[in-house]
Amino acid sequence: MKRLSKCIVAIVALLASFLSLTNTASAANKNVQINSNIEARVVFGDRIEGADEVIGTEFMVDASGASSNVDENMLMYVSVEPDFFANAKLTSVKINNEAQTITSPNGRNVYTLSAADSYTIDIMGTASINYNINWSNPGYTNPDTPNDVKILNGIAKVVKVYDNAANMNDISASIPCVATGCVDDATKEGFIHFEKGNVIVFEFIPQYGYQLTSVNMNGLPLTPQNDANQYILDTASANGNGHFSATFTKTDDAVKTYSSAITSGVLDLSNGAIDAGTGVLSVNDFTPSAEQAAKFAETASGYEIADYLDLDMQQVFYKGVNDDTDVWSNNLTQLSADANISLKLAEGVDGNDVVIVHEKHDGTHELISGIYDADTKTVSFATDGFSNYAIAYRTVAKIPDSGFFTSEISGAKESIIGVVVTALGSVVALYIVSGKIKKEQ
């Protein structure tokens, strides 16, 4: 019995010794040194949950780094990410002096650890400063919108974002709001959260009859680009949250004449012909070919052609300054609605009935009625197409002391005198009949 007891004791002692050795082996630690110049989160673990969550021992490190012993069973995987609240991003990660690929500079990066006696993790990154820009386009619904963020007579939206002025890497895809211009379609509120140093491309579109004559963001200039209404904001010098100071100035449509036949003019596109900016009509002299002249004359049969003109229409946008000589422009050959045009003739015409002949882009011609003011030598008409034109005139007989003219409509002559006489005769007859009836009563 004593022998059995001694045997059991020996077995227990042996088992305890074995368990002690096993525990010692499982608890073996290896030194880990983390060097970092930014605030970061480092996790060592033996498994990964989800797509990138390493489960194990976590370290939150700052620029001074960290050093510790870690259970070697946890040294299978390591994840490295910048601290979310530090506005930092990774630029370099090395494990035991071997460079690692960074797949997410602003997020989590997971690496598989090779066997080693110890581990040194070197982390390099940059800490960013983030700001906001907010604005409100016309139609905003928030009654508490501050006046200094309201944009009047135009709209603003984000077109593109680059990382910085030195690299100009397009990072628009990583900023979800860019797809909608960073403007809420329901509230018309605009907002973008950016990293200091980003280069943001904005688009400022004036309403019809207005031009953008000044724009900045907290004093930082916005530089016009090649594309119409687009401006670049370099935020490297930004020092806080901001909003736009954008001035859209009321601006009239204009006529620029380079013709010896036209001294000046007036253009009005307020019928909805264009939806933004203003229009400029350029008037030039035009010399038709013999074939063109014949077609003009045929269309204006019965009229004398006074002048041939080339009319060009452009939709223009100022480049953020009150200057109509350096603008973005779109050439328009056809409008969605009529333009009202008045042209002052240098010599006037020897007639009182004026029409306009339009050579359309398909080669056909149309006759457009015009109004002629002999006192100002001005002819006015409406049209929606722009190409070659001719001004034609004739003299229509005037009814003596009446102010009326005879007119010709579609080749059939109708005397206004006859109409007036007939009308007067009817009135007289009615008067006589009425008087007769009264007498009989």
Image: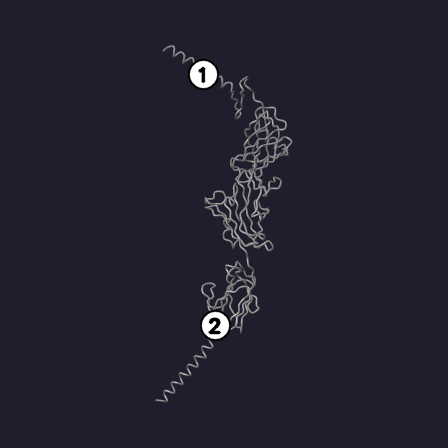
Disc 1 or disc 2, which is closer to the eye? Answer: 2
- Percent position (x, y) of residue 28? 48, 75
Q: Amino acid at mark 1?
A: Val
Q: Amino acid at mark 2?
A: Asn
Residue sticking out furthest to the left:
1
Mark 1 element type: helix
Q: Give the labeled residue for mark 2.
A: 73
Residue sticking out furthest to the right:
260
- Percent position (x, y) of residue 272? 51, 37
Is 79 positioned to the left or the right of 6 in the image? right
Q: Give the labeled residue for mark 1.
A: 427
- Percent position (x, y) of residue 364? 56, 34
Quadrant (top left/top right/bottom left/bottom right) for the N terminus: bottom left
**Up/down of 418 relative to 195, above or below:** above
- Percent position (x, y) of residue 222? 58, 47
Q: Residue at x 54, y 17 (%)?
A: 401
